[in-house]
Image: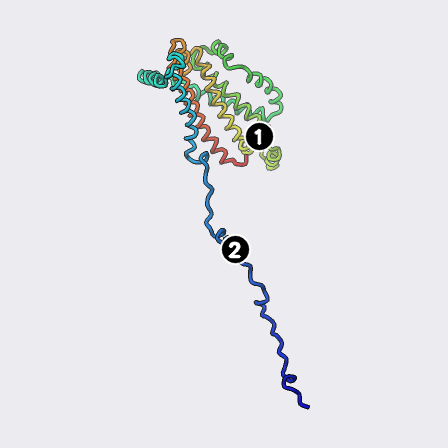
Amino acid sequence: MKTSTLDKAPVSRPSPAPETQRQSAPEQKPQSAVLKNTAPSRKPRKSLLESRWSWILGALLPIALLALWQFLSSTGVFSAVQLPAPSKVLAAAADLWTRGDLGLHIAISTQRVVLGFVIGAVLGLVLGALIGLSRWAKTLGGPIIGAFRAVPSLAWVPLLLLWIGIGEDSKVTLVAIGAFFPVYTTVSAALAHVDPKLVEAARSFGVRGISLFRSVQLPAVLPSVVSGLRLALAQAWLFLVAAELLGASMGLGFLLTDSQNNGRTDRLLLAIVLLAILGKITDALVGLFEGWVKKKFPSN
C-alpha cells in the first residue's frame, strides 16, 4: 500500500520571528511635542518696573504735584502770598543765584551734613559694635543711650549754643547727634542677632577679638548697617534744619527762617524744594553703595 506524497512531505514549521521584529516599535512622540522641545526658548519679558525706563514711573507723581501746584496758584485757590506759582519760585532761585547767595547756602548746608554724618556714623558704628558685642557694655550703657535717643532735636539746640557757642561746631555736633542714633541702633541690634554657630565656628579656628569682628561679624551685619546709614543720612538733614533755624547766618535752614520773617514765600518754598532734592541725591548715592553690598553679600 503506497503512502501518499502528502504524508511523506515534511511539515514546515513557522520560523521564529527575528528579535528586532519581536520588539515593539518605539513610541513616537506627537509632532507638537517635538516642535515644543525644538522651539527656541524665549526669555521672560521684563516688566516696566524692572526695565531701565522705570524712572519714568517715579517722575509721574512729582510732575502731577507740580501741575497741581500750578493749578492752585493760577486759579486763585491760594493767594500769591500763600502759594506762589512755580515760575515765581524759579525766578527767586535765579535771583539768588545771580547774587551768589544760592550756591553758598547749598554748599554750607551740604558741608555741615557731610561732616556731621561722617562723625555720627563712625561713633554709631563704634558704640553700636561695643553694645552689640559686650553684655557688660549693653547693661551699663544701653539704657542711658536709649534715653538720649528719645530727646527731640530742638531740645539740644539751646544746650549746644550754651556749651559750644554760635558757630559751625554746634551745628555739626547737632547733625552728628542726629546721624548717630540710627547707625548705633542698627549695628547693635544686628550684631546681637548674628548666627551663634557662625561665631563659634570662627572661634574654633582661633579667630577672636577684632579679627573676629572684622572677618565674620561685620560682613554678616554689613547690609543692615548700610540700611542704617540711609536712615542716618535722612536724620542728618532733619537735624540740619533744626541747627540752622537758630544761630545761623547762612544755609538752607537760615534761608527758611529769613524768608518767613521777610514774607518771601517764594524763597521759603525754594528752600524746601532744595532740601528735598539734596536729600534725594545723597540718599541715591548711599543706595548705590547699598546695592553693591547686597550683591557682595547675597546670603545676608
First in sequence: mark 1 vs mark 2: 2
Is 146 situated left or right of 53 in this image? Answer: right
Which numbered mark, 1 or 2, is in the foreground of this view? Answer: 2
**What SS does tag 2 mark?**
loop
Q: Which residue is outermost to the bottom?
A: 1
Packing grade of label 2 (10 A; few <14, some 14-19, many >=20) is few
In which quadrant will I find the N terminus? bottom right
Q: Which residue is mark 1?
A: 209
In this picture, is 12 found above or below 104? below
Instruction: Give me the residue at 60% from left, 74% from top.
Output: 15
| Residue found farthest to the left | 98
Q: Residues within 10 Å of mark 1 (few under 14, many from 20)?
A: few
Which residue is most to the right?
A: 1
Q: Secondary structure at mark 1?
A: helix
Mark 1–mark 2 Cα distance, whole angstroms, equals 67 Å
Q: How many marks?
A: 2
Tag on residue 123? Answer: none
Q: Residue 59: image x %, image y %?
A: 41, 27
Kindly indicate the quadrant of the structure image that contains residue 127.
top right
Q: Amino acid at mark 1?
A: Gly
> In this rendering, does residue 107 appear at all?
no
The residue closer to the viewer here, 14 or 281, is 14
Identify the image's colour scheme: rainbow, by chain, secondary structure or one colour: rainbow
Is any part of residue 65 visible from this angle?
yes
Is the residue under label 2 in contact with that under label 1 (CB below 8 Å)? no
Q: Is residue 140 above or below residue 22?
A: above
Residue 202 placement: quadrant: top right
x and y, in percent, of residue 243 in the image: 45, 14
Q: Which residue is mark 2?
A: 30
Q: Is residue 276 left or right of residue 146?
A: left
